Image: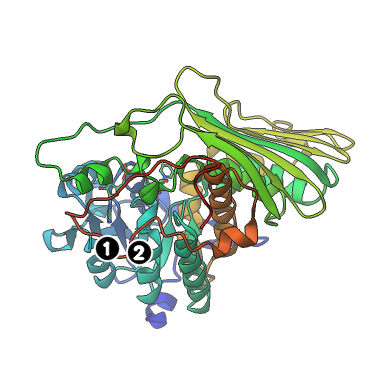
Amino acid sequence: MNYSRRNFLKTAGIATVGSVIVPNLAWASKTPWTSNSDTLKVGLIGCGGRGTGAAEEALNADPNVILFAMADAFSDQLETSYNSLKEKLKNKVQVSGQNKFVGLDAYQKLIDSDVDVVLLAAPPAFRPAHLEAAVNAGRHIFCEKPFAVDAPGLRRVIAAAKKAKEKNLSLVSGFCWRYHLPKRETFGKIVNHQIGGILTAEATYDTGELWFKERQKGWSDFEYQLRNWLYYNWLSGDHINEQAIHSIDMLQWAMGDVVPLQVTGSGGRQKRTDPKFGNVYDHFAVVYEYPGGAKAYFRCRQQNNTSPSYAVELVGSDGKCVVDCRTGAHQITGKNPWNYDDETKFTDENAYKRSQSRSMYQQEHDELFASIRADKPMNDGEWMTRSNLVALAGRMAGYTGQTITLDQALSSNEVLFPENISWDTRYDVPIAIPGVTGFK
Ligand SMILES: NC(=O)c1ccc[n+]([C@@H]2O[C@H](COP(=O)([O-])OP(=O)(O)OC[C@H]3O[C@@H](n4cnc5c(N)ncnc54)[C@H](O)[C@@H]3O)[C@@H](O)[C@H]2O)c1
């Protein structure tokens, strides 16, 4: 990593509030933008819905950033993303033909190109390899959640995140609620014991079904699965890991990022049973037991025509807290009542105003790029991998029907994502059955 260049890049106005680096957005009014030697070059790996969104946010996070390279398993995905970004962001998108990389090794070619920052947004199974390669090459990283689909993959991510810290690289996770200012205010109070010690918690991610891509002529089994990666646990880690992990992460935040001791639960496929939906479950319900005796009741489902819920409710010795992602509620009742919407009770007088105008997705990138400019690397590695472990342990408990300790979960040797993948490999898709499927 060439730090002399990084030092030269410390030009954007940066203000630091507490430990959070706040970007100065005064540049936003300056036009037109021109590329120069301060330019940060961004590479996008995984050009789907989220990756395209992340690229837009990265390009809007700093006055002097360009999209320099793109990588995807499929050229149609890459071109759709490129065209949409080019239309919106014009000359900030400068991806030449030779910097468009397609295929399963596209990520490495992108990382080896002259990029400063990579955005990792391919399906989760690939994340350990992509993250390791980015860290090895000395790139700053935005890394979508989740980070692995199995414990061996997660152990690689833990090691790579540690290495990123040693190399002074920024690593920002896609756990976007951690960058949502109202939730920072609220969970900040919880961590500071505003409702006392937490006794019980309920966390939910109950939603409907997601997209599905019909099989096209010429698609191999592998391509079909990769294009429908959500439905294959070897690619997504199942929906408790892929989607509902947002609620698990908020729960972990409230619990001070202490991992539970063990988890017991259940899950299955009741509604989404067609073989076209691979081998993932459509519901899980698990109970996490934390050191000190607190219990967290967590459930998630992806079933149409069912009541939605996306919330965390905490009961403490001195009160209760409700954070509801659907209604926007952030409320504490009990000894020290507080409501996010009551501006006068803010600890930081600017936080409310800032939060009104900031999208959490934009905030992630604003902080990432501000940290690079300020040469003050951020590293979400520790807590982000803990939340991933908690999600994986919940899946293991659901799949096996057994009580699983978090130590067991972390040392599991079950490999869902095979080492050497290729376009013509056939992957079995066994569906786990509680009481039959064993813990490995
Ligand atoms: N933080 C959030 O709120 C949020 C929201 C949506 C998705 N996500 C996460 O972002 C990631 C991507 O989700 P998405 O909704 O954009 O999915 P998507 O299917 O729209 O995009 C994934 C892209 O990765 C490409 N891809 C597949 N294998 C690849 C490989 N080996 N190398 C490079 N590219 C590859 C696909 O072709 C596709 O273009 C997932 O991890 C998902 O959990 C996060």
Q: Amino acid at mark 2?
A: His
Residue lying farthest to the front in this orientation: 436
Task: Please indicate, yes or no, whether residue 29 appears anywhere in the rendered image.
Answer: no
Residue 87 vs residue 55: left or right?
left
Using the image, determine if residue 162 lies above or below residue 318.
below
Q: Disc 2 vs disc 1: Cβ atoms closer than 8 Å? A: yes
Residue 307: give its label: none
Q: Residue 359's spot in the image, x, y percent? A: 50, 41
30 and 259: which one is in front?
Answer: 259
Give 262 or 258, whichever is nearer the viewer.
Answer: 262
Find out if the beta carbon at label 2 lies less than 8 Å from the nearest ligand 1 atom: yes
| Residue on which disc 1 sits | 107
> Vertical placement of 171 versus 332: above or below?
below
Q: Can residue 395 be seen here?
A: yes
Which of marks 1 and 2 precedes in the sequence?
Answer: 1
Kindly identify which numbered label has been placed on residue 130: 2
How many discs mark residues in the rendered view? 2
Dividing the image into 4 quarters, which one contains the N terminus?
bottom left
**Mark 2, secondary structure of its residue:** helix
